[in-house]
Image (cartoon, rainbow, N blue to C red):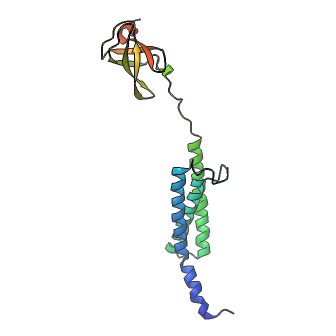
Amino acid sequence: MTSRSSWPIVAVGLAHWGAMFVVVGVVGALLLVVFLLFDDVLDGILPDSEWISGPIIGAFLAAFGLFGWVAEAGFDAPPAVAAAIGVAGGVGLGWFAYKVTRALMNSPTDATPTTASLVGQHARVVTPVRAGGTGEVLVRLGGQPVKLSATADVDLPRGTESVVVAVESATRVRVESADTFWKQ
């Protein structure tokens, strides 16, 4: 038979459940941030599994702590019920994190732009191009302005609108005046 003097100890132990949920939630949120920022560095810590990852574990723990704390502190749920609600919330947010990370990992990307894709592109002469010599043109490669060395059959003064007609190397293109190119 339990003496009445041990009840306050049990009550004090149960009063710390809310703090436990908060600590687990904060640790989970910190793990989530750390794994999102340093996932490549920390990749070897966890087993190589599709459904176990740092962000998923962090999301589970953060949701467990948050849902458990809200259930226990906000709705006066008993600790076991609050823990069950925390587990349900953790599984839900963990599943969501799994789906989001999987979608991001498998998302398609555009092809890497290459200088070969410049043929036919608009260019502007920024350093005069001498016939048989070189100058510089500004073109857009992958949406970014790129200055390249340029050659032409005729003199092209600075500011001339031109078209890339050939790629001679990774850093040099052959251009033609846009007026001449479009008249052909």
Residue 69 in the figure: left or right of residue 137: right
Report the label total.
0
x then y, percent, for residue 155: 33, 8
User: In the rendered view, would you say 53 is above or below 137?
Assistant: below
x then y, percent, for residue 157: 30, 12
Residue 52 in the figure: left or right of residue 134: right
- Most extreme residue toward the right, as rendered? 1
Q: Quadrant of the C terminus?
A: top left
x then y, percent, for residue 72: 54, 73
Of residue 98 and residue 88, the one placed in the foreground of this image is 98
Residue 160 in the figure: left or right of residue 37: left
- Most extreme residue toward the front, as rendered? 133
Of residue 89 and residue 180, the one placed in the foreground of this image is 180
Q: Quadrant of residue 65?
A: bottom right
x then y, percent, for residue 15: 54, 80
User: In the rendered view, would you say 167 is above or below 46?
Assistant: above
Residue at position x 53%, y 50% in the image: 38
Residue at position x 41%, y 29% in the image: 144
Of residue 131 and residue 35, the one placed in the foreground of this image is 131
User: In the rendered view, would you say 6 is above or below 23?
Assistant: below
Of residue 70 and residue 65, the one placed in the foreground of this image is 65
Residue at position x 57%, y 54% in the image: 55
Q: Quadrant of residue 64?
A: bottom right
Residue at position x 69%, y 93% in the image: 1
